[in-house]
Amino acid sequence: DQQVKQNSPSLSVQEGRISILNCDYTNSMFDYFLWYKKYPAEGPTFLISISSIKDKNEDGRFTVFLNKSAKHLSLHIVPSQPGDSAVYFCAAPIIQGAQKLVFGQGTRLTINP
Amino acid sequence: EADIYQTPRYLVIGTGKKITLECSQTMGHDKMYWYQQDPGMELHLIHYSYGVNSTEKGDLSSESTVSRIRTEHFPLTLESARPSHTSQYLCASSANTYGYTFGSGTRLTVV
């Protein structure tokens, strides 16, 4: 039972354009979401997060949007840069019982020059 | 500057060997985790610990074992490595559930 889903395994975007990565979730109890970025052979690094009391959070070129009614969040990167090429994971914490983060499958973003 | 360290970064080892993947953190976090990730797949939680002498199995069944004798140290051991254990192993720690700090990972290849 995958509670966080990223249905696009890969995305290719031209440098300078907007990258939009999507994430859906099934657990209505989730109240916080995170995006991690991962380069090959490296551990994931935290990118940006959003609380369910907000519908938008912005940090420089990165903006996360949350649509609670649709159980959907998206990460926007504007403008996209070659260094943004990586795998992006969305995640949500489970705070009941075994407290842990659950991750989506990841989306591989490739920025083309 | 990394506050959580994993060694080795890469390991190629023969079938049947015993291996220990090291993970140490300097942040004083009580919670530590081991995830396993195959290319193109999500991160699967295989072990976690909420403090010294506390260890639990995660969502993904794993033949590995862990120990937590000191707060800062959370090693993972495979008694007899097999090719099916080939994967990337990621260690993480957190002060709370709202975000982890990950190590750089260990890429294990069993031949």
Image (cartoon, coloured by chain):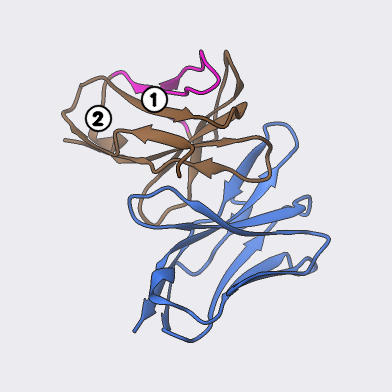
Chain B, colour shown:
brown
Q: Quick check: can you spot residue A1? A: no
User: From the viewer's perspective, is B6 left or right of A61?
Assistant: left
Residue A16 is situated, as x and y percent measured from the top left of the image, at: 46, 86
Q: Which residue type does callout 1 highlight?
A: Glu
* Position of A64 relative to A28 (above/below): below
Residue B71 is situated, as x and y percent measured from the top left of the image, at: 55, 20
* Position of A23 relative to A41 (above/below): below
Chain A, colour shown:
blue
Please give the label number shown on residue B63: 1
Instruction: Report the Cα–Cα distance between label 1 and label 2.
Output: 10 Å
Most distant residue in the right direction: A53
Q: Which residue is mark 2?
A: B82
Residue A36 belongs to the span the image colors magenta: no
* Position of A53 relative to B104 (above/below): below
Q: Who's the residue at 40% across and 70% down the image?
A: A83
Q: What segment is highlighted magenta in the picture? A: B61-79
